[in-house]
Amino acid sequence: MKAARMARIRDIIWENFHQHLHDQVIAPLKQGMTNDSYYLELDGRRYVLRLNGAGSEKLIDRQEEVATYQTIASSGIAEPVIAISPTGGYKISELLSGVHNCRPQDMSEVQACMKKLRWFHELSLPYHKSFDILQKIAFYEDLWTRPSEHDDYAIVREAVFRLAPLRHLRSRPLCLCHIDAVYDNFLLTEDGQVYLVDWEYAAGCDPLMDPAMFSIYAGYRERRALRLLDIYLGHPATREERYRYTSYMAAGGLLWSNWCEYKETFGEIFGSYAAMQYRYAKDCVRWAKKWEA
């Protein structure tokens, strides 16, 4: 672990627990796509410390994140947060025991997660900003320091931006959404309880954006993606719902592909994940056009 990062962790532990680092157990937990996480054990209690990953300070509004966690606290859907800093970009949460990430090929687990997600959306909790995915795609483009690595990027971008549900997104009834509701962010307990963690991208949006993001992260092809939509809705989707959903999948693929291109300027490599997201941007335009009125 680099000395600067260790010093940062030492300061955070002292600020929040008034304990010295050498008295505690600390170990890297994972290097995520947006953040880095560390395992802490203090006085017999276990925690997860989240720090910004490379370049993430330009991607996340941490003050909005704090406001979101305050909003959802009473719902019990999120991880138990001990401390979160709107200026320092860190979060300390309790390490949940006996949990595992949702397995996207286990449809019983997926069904439990979609049921929890729909329950949360139906709470209609307030939000502080709305999520315009086309604006966010352009925002990531503005962060680039070099042209896209994809020779057909301009063509793919134009096709995505022409999809009507994306241009009219803000006219839809919106609610607080997770935006990054991928299977890795769903935690299931042995007794069937479901948590949804890491709310840093959360904003007001059409709720179908969340299952769309689940699908493109899980690598679902068209038939399974549409099945997921039916599971989330609790009924067979209408043509209009399929059109919105597959349009969001197309835009989500372009969004995360652009995100990867930005993060790769810091030396990070996403390989097949980045390629898969760009493929969704291309394929899902075709899927969406099947459902145009």
Image: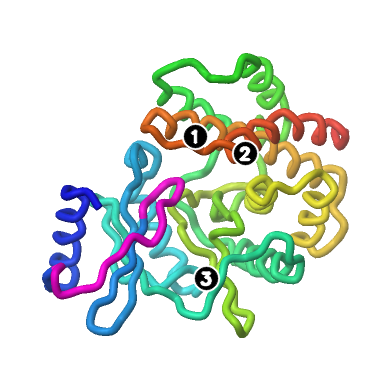
Magenta stretch?
21-36
**Of marks 2 and 3, which one's residue comes earlier in the chain?**
3
Count of numbered marks: 3
Amino acid beneath label 1:
Trp
Residue 186 vs residue 163, the one in the foreground = 186
Q: CB under 8 Å between callouts 3 and 1?
A: no
Is residue 207 something one can see in this rendering? no
SS of the residue at dot 3? loop
At label 3, counting other C-alpha atoms closer than 10 Å, the crowd grade (few under 14, some 14-19, many 20 or more) is some
Which numbered dot is residue 77? 3
Q: Nearer the viewer, mark 2 or mark 3?
A: 2
SS of the residue at dot 2? helix
Q: How far apart are marks 2 and 1 (CA)?
A: 10 Å
Which numbered dot is residue 259? 1
Residue that appears at 34% across and 40% down: 54
Q: Name the residue under label 2.
A: 252
Q: How far apart are marks 3 and 1 (CA)?
A: 27 Å
Would residue 30 appear left or right of 21 to someone viewing this image?
A: right
**Of marks 3 and 1, which one's residue comes earlier in the chain?**
3
Q: How far apart are marks 2 and 3 (CA)?
A: 24 Å
Would residue 246 appear left or right of 41 to someone viewing this image?
A: right
Would residue 246 appear left or right of 6 to someone viewing this image?
A: right
**Of marks 2 and 1, which one's residue comes earlier in the chain?**
2
Q: In this view, does 37 lie above or below 55?
A: below
Which numbered dot is residue 215? none
At label 2, counting other C-alpha atoms closer than 10 Å, the crowd grade (few under 14, some 14-19, many 20 or more) is many
Question: Which quadrant, please, contains the C terminus?
Answer: top right
Q: In this view, does 14 lie above or below 6?
A: below
* Residue 58 image point, x, y percent: 35, 36
Hey, which quadrant is residue 159 in on the image? top right
Q: Which of marks 3 and 1 is in front?
A: 1
